[in-house]
Amino acid sequence: MHILIVSDSHGMNDSLKVTILKEKPDMLIHLGDSEYSQAEIASWAGSPKTPCVFVKGNCDSSSCDPSLVKDEAVFSLKGHRFYCTHGHRQRVNYGLLVLSLTAMEKNCDICLFGHTHVPYDSYGDSVSDFDRAYGSGDVSYNVHILNPGSISLPRGGSKRGYMIMDMDDDGRYDVKYRVIE
């Protein structure tokens, strides 16, 4: 299964549309701040045949279509449990402790978030550079935490990008961060 993970397109969808057409995902996960264009994005991905998950970001209107956009999403796929959120409610700009505890509370082993516009990939029991920088202290993660950065407006010296998760039928997966040139 070829899963496209994006965030923070902020209504600037040229790169997103090209990426969807290039990657031809089996599933699309948008982690918020798509700004009013969820139905259009889903159509590019081939919805309803291609499952699409949209979570609401802090820049997404409260009038988003509730049949398409959720405050957060929790689902199971090939033996894994995913927790998807934008991250602003978990205050990810100040560390990942609340985010990781929320994912663990929901029995998720994969946690996807956006909001920071900076790519992030951490798994295991080690303290991450992000947590050292933001003072969360020693946090033991039992969850793979991923942020694809922003496909439109990168920050912190990163480039426009997204993540691809390829997952086999047994649930083994590989994640790659890809930069948009």
Image: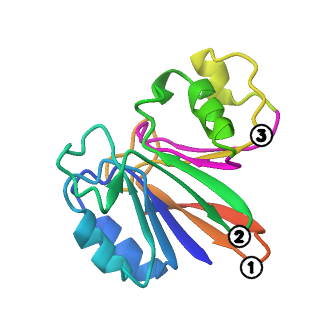
Q: Earlier in the sequence, mark 3 or mark 1?
A: 3
Q: Residue under circle 2?
A: 78
Residue at left 36%, top 79%?
A: 47
Give the magenta range: 108-125
Q: In this view, does 54 lie to the left or right of 119?
A: left
Q: Indicate the position of residue 38 as horizontal and vertical percent values.
A: 27, 63
Q: Indicate the position of residue 6 as horizontal and vertical percent values.
A: 44, 58
Q: Residue under circle 3?
A: 142
**What's the residue type where badge 1 is placed?**
Asp
Q: What element carries label 2?
A: loop
Q: Are marks 2 and 1 in contact (CB under 8 Å)?
A: yes
The verdict on residue 113 being magenta is: yes
Q: Which of 108 and 141 is in front in this view?
A: 108
Q: Is mark 3 on a helix, strand or loop?
A: loop
Q: Residue under circle 1?
A: 169
Tell me the CA gap for discs 3 and 1: 22 Å
Q: Nearer the viewer, residue 54 or 151?
A: 54
**What's the residue type where badge 3 is placed?**
Asn
Q: Quadrant of residue 60?
A: top left
Q: Which of 92 and 101 is in front in this view?
A: 101
Residue at left 63%, top 42%?
A: 106
Tell me the CA gap for discs 2 and 1: 6 Å
